[in-house]
Image (cartoon, grey):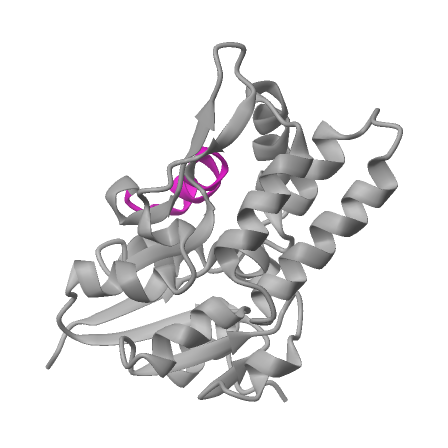
Amino acid sequence: MSKKYYIIDFDSTFIQVEALDELARISLKDHPERENSYKEIEVLTNQAMEGQLSFRESLAKRIQLLEANKNHLKQLVKHLKKLVSVSFARNKNFFKHHADDVLIVSGGFKEFITPVVLPFHIKKENIYANTFLFNKEGGIIGYDERNPLSYEGGKVKLLRELQLEGDIHGIGDGYSDFQLKESGMISKFYAFTENIERKSVIAKADYITPSLDEFLYINQLPAAISYPKP
């Protein structure tokens, strides 16, 4: 029997929101043009998630607009810990029993992803994400451009490098998650719709999973609540 791996997205999947959008609300709180910047960042996020804009271009533009620093990141982590997706929060046991099989693969950033997912028994070495670059004052000035996840199609590039052998399942809400299926790097793609439904992504999914419980049910894994619901 081949080993199973579960590739899980972070933004709008593991958590209920898009972390960079939330970081903008923290870092630009007192900025006179904050409402325009919020909208611009949200538009850039959605364009990348729906495959209308290259991920790299979207990321670079969003970071430029953020004007964020390490102190803002601390506030963000505290905020995100309260916003773990409801079905993920109630299925902590799944992560505990599959700690070797679960990989968090995200175009987001380790600085806020790692502290949010570690309490779920996810191994540090199984967290794949971008990393920020800071100036001497702790301000975010960019990101490590050598990281494959900072590129368009980065998740595909990363999985090629990892060369996992087994039956690989991907769970996510965005176009970059579907790209894994399209490239043949995963056997099944589950569009996770608990937090957001992107029609362009749903149309291409093997399964539409409105919660982690449903994903676990489909794969005959123990879930916190029993399926199918009455």
Quarter of the image with the C terminus is bottom right
Find residue 21 and report its horizontal and vertical position in percent: 68, 46
Whether residue 26 is visible here, answered yes or no, is yes
In the image, the segment drawn in magenta is: 111-123
Q: Is residue 91 left or right of residue 39?
A: left
**Which one is nearer the viewer's eye here, 209 or 181?**
181
Whether residue 222 is visible here, answered yes or no, is no
Residue 214 falls inside the magenta stretch: no
Q: Is residue 2 left or right of residue 86?
A: left
Residue drawn 37% across the image and 41% down it? 145
Dividing the picture into quadrants, the one containing residue 221 is bottom left
Residue drawn 66% across the image and 63% down it? 46
**Which one is nearer the viewer's eye here, 206 or 204?**
204
Find residue 77 and report its horizontal and vertical position in percent: 57, 33
Quarter of the image with the N terminus is bottom left
**Which one is nearer the viewer's eye here, 78 or 66?**
66
Residue drawn 54% across the image and 26% down it? 140
For this orientation, the residue located farthest to the top is: 137
Find residue 7 and report its horizontal and vertical position in percent: 35, 64
Q: Is residue 139 left or right of residue 91?
A: right
Find residue 216 and report its horizontal and vertical position in percent: 41, 75
